[in-house]
Amino acid sequence: MEPKQIIQNWVKAFNKGDANLIAEFYSEKAINHQVANEPVIGKSAIKQMFATEFAAAEMVCIVENIFQDGHWAILEWRDPIGLRGCGFFQVENGLITFQRGYWDKLSFLKAHNLPIPN
């Protein structure tokens, strides 16, 4: 499966809010680095990150564009409340090995009435 197709399926899993399902897209040693946070390393830790985030806020990813360049897929997204971002996914052997996301954490926290760290 091509990286673009994997990310299309990843979005479907993300929108179900199922951490177990979304974790299956990652390799055992994957790195997920949302630049507003510290990198999360390993499939198990990534699964826990998603479980925590899905429990804290209802998140929906609306695809604006998905581009592919070799082993990379680039996702440009928005959500129903107007937040926007993008993600870069490196895919090897059908699994995400590296992900980097760019989005406005402060706007996200405010929009979901979550605590803002000092």
Image (spheres, rainbow, N blue to C red):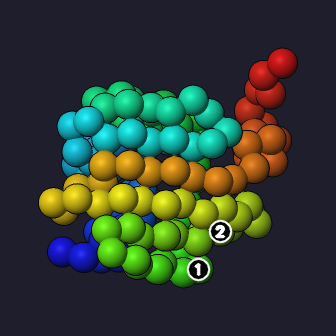
Q: Is residue 18 visible?
A: no
Dividing the picture into quadrants, the one containing residue 105 is top right
Q: Which residue is drawn at 59% across and 80% down?
A: 64
Q: Mark 2: few, some, or many residues within 10 Å (few <14, many ≥20)?
A: some
Q: In which quarter of the image is the C terminus?
A: top right
Is disc 2 placed on a helix, strand or loop? strand
Residue 78 is marked as 2
SS for callout 1: strand
Which of the numbered marks, if any, corresponds to residue 93?
A: none
Q: Quick one: quadrant of the N terminus?
A: bottom left
* 65 or 62, nearer to the observer: 65
What's the residue at 75%, 50% (across, down)? 104
Residue beneath the point at 36% across and 59% down: 90
Camera-side residue of 41 and 10: 41
- 64 in relation to 54, above or below: below
Label 2 close to label 1 by CB (< 8 Å): yes
Q: How many labels does the image show?
A: 2
Q: Position of residue 7 (x, y in %)?
A: 36, 68
The alpha-carbon separation of the residues under discs 2 and 1 comes to 7 Å
Amino acid, disc 1: Glu
Q: In this view, does 34 lie above or below 40?
A: below
Q: Which of marks 2 and 1 is nearer the N terminus?
A: 1
Provide residue 94's location: percent of width, then percent of height. 19, 62
Where is residue 68 shown, x and y percent of the image?
A: 40, 78
Q: Can residue 60 be seen?
A: yes
